[in-house]
Image (spheres, rainbow, N blue to C red):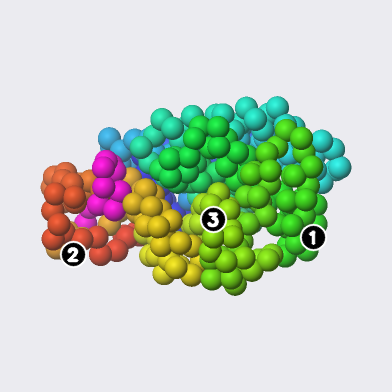
Amino acid sequence: MRLISVEEYNDKTMQLARPIYDKHKRVLLAAGRAIHPTYLKKLIAMDIRYLFIEDSISFGISMEEMVDVPTWMDAIETLQMSFKAIANKEELPIRQLQKLVITLVNEVGKRKAICLIPTSSIAEELREYAHAVNVTLLSLQIGRKLGISQMQLKDLAMGALLHDIGKALTHRVEDHMVVGFEYLRKVREISLLAAHVAYGHHETIDGNGKPRGMKEGEIHEFAQVCGIANLYENMLSKEGLPPHEVMEYIMTKSGTMFTTDLVKLFVQEVPHYIPGTKVLLNNNRKAIVTKIIGNLQRPYIRYLDNGEELSLADHYTLLIKEMVIDEVTSIN
Ligand SMILES: [Fe+2]
Ligand SMILES: [Fe+2]
């Protein structure tokens, strides 16, 4: 399986590998078939930018670093319910949220690394919730590496899931951290720690963040974790940048937005390339990333010309020059 942008789709050589859902979370296109050009246009009209496909070069690539789509969609649904409940002045579906927290802690716990499904692979109406789920998955991956206890990981997850919940309560985006915090700290079942994640996720250690301009040492560590995951997720999903470019950008924020220790950990623990990415190496040969084991910055690749597979961690002179995107579909 591999993830491609819609422009790369070729109905002669590719089959859809994962279903595509509409805004009601119903299957719009089932897996295992080619996408008819009419439907492809429909997807483009829905602003769906990524597809999971299977083709002759994607064999053996499992993408087990990504949570499976039904789990992801369930999580999105619970969050959508939560946001809607709050906007309607109803109570949070707290039992479901607690169940979701446990699911996500387990999902991250059973994987060595986490790759995110870009939110632009589903209908626009669901992206805000998918964003929060992704931020939570990433926060948990980092939290686990920070050695945070199982108990506190749950608080971190709850905070990350609801980090933007203030947006359901106010139209003034700049207020969503404070409004979210004020709301969450009054919910008996939610820990103050989780509320602080919502409060501090736009603070930066140089004091230029919001809402209070707190400095290093004043911002809760969990809020910083959520903050870095939030930045990463937005650049990946909203701005559509490839993971390695997002990573480079995050590195430039070391010591200003986030502590150098946190950025270092992030760079070590979050994959720079997603399995299934087509790349050009510095020996001018094209390859596909097949798996990430051990060193997340230097994955395994398979040459497209002769099928030879090797680990970049064992070949230090080999570098990935760029991602290769073969545009096939003409979008008009
Ligand atoms: Fe936010
Ligand atoms: Fe966010």
The residue nearer to you, when weighing 261 against 225, is 261
Q: Are discs 1 and 2 less than 8 Å apart at CB?
A: no
Please name the residue shown 26% across and 47% down the image. Answer: 295
Q: Is residue 284 above or below residue 55?
A: below
Mark 1 and mark 3: span between their CA atoms? 24 Å
> Which residue is identified by label 3?
224
Residue flagged by tag 1: what amino acid is it?
Answer: His
**Disc on res. 282:** 2
Q: Quadrant of residue 174?
A: bottom right
Please name the residue shown 31% across and 60% down the image. Answer: 324
Residue flagged by tag 2: what amino acid is it?
Answer: Asn
Q: Is residue 40 above or below residue 189?
A: below
Task: Give the side of residue 132 with respect to residue 172, left or right.
Answer: left
Residue 242 horizontal/vertical position (percent): 41, 59
Residue flagged by tag 3: what amino acid is it?
Answer: Gln
The residue nearer to you, when weighing 166 against 44, is 166
Badge 2 element:
loop
**Disc on res. 114:** none
297 within the magenta span: yes
